[in-house]
Image (spheres, rainbow, N blue to C red):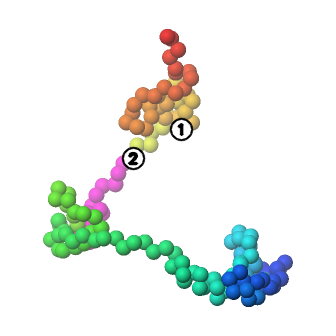
Amino acid sequence: MMSNEGYQDRVLVCRDCGQDFTFSAGEQAFYASRGLTNSPGRCASCRAIRKSQQGGGPQQRPRTEMYPTICASCGRETTVPFIPREDRPVYCSDCYQAQRANRAPRQQDYSYNYGSSEESQGNSWGRNSNRDNRGGRERRNNRSERDYSW
């Protein structure tokens, strides 16, 4: 339960209509609990009008265009949110869930080298510091590995 201790009702003037409105102790405690430091500048009715003019509430996402297709598994007509290609199978939602359940989970290799070998020097994760994550290309950015023999 929210405590209203330390807060007193305050009378404020609406910046839109100029009418007085009360910023209650409960509202002040609510604002403080959300980290809001400024007092409201509009009365409740002017806030509602402004909110309705701006579209009110959370922004609506545009509707996704759906494309008709035939399920590759059961042959039923369905719609999908992407343009189907001839070279890839497209499934209805039921068949897709069945295909997904039958698929083997991906195996990820999390082999780290925590030893103190030359490869792990200067690398906080202990992985091979001579390689980066872009296709295994060599990189030389440690000062100890730079070639200064020119």
Residue 149 rendering spot, x and y as whole percentages: 50, 11
Chain part drawn in magenta: 92-107
The residue under the point 39% across, 31% down is: 137
Q: Report whether residue 117 is seen.
A: no
Residue 124 rendering spot, x and y as whole percentages: 57, 36
Camera-nearest residue between 68 and 74? 68
Q: Amino acid at mark 1?
A: Trp
**Residue designated by label 2:** 108
The residue under the point 19% across, 69% down is: 69
| Placement of 112 over or under 92, stated as above or below | above
Measured Cα–Cα span from mark 1 to mark 2: 16 Å
**Residue designated by label 1:** 125
The residue under the point 60% across, 85% down is: 48
Q: Amino acid at mark 2?
A: Gln
- Counting residues from the start of the chain, the first of labels 1 and 2 encountered is 2
Q: Residues within 10 Å of mark 1 (few under 14, many from 20)?
A: few
Instruction: Indicate whether residue 106 is drawn in magenta.
Output: yes
Q: How many marks?
A: 2
130 left or right of 4?
left
* Quadrant (top left/top right/bottom left/bottom right) for the N terminus: bottom right
State the SS at label 1.
loop
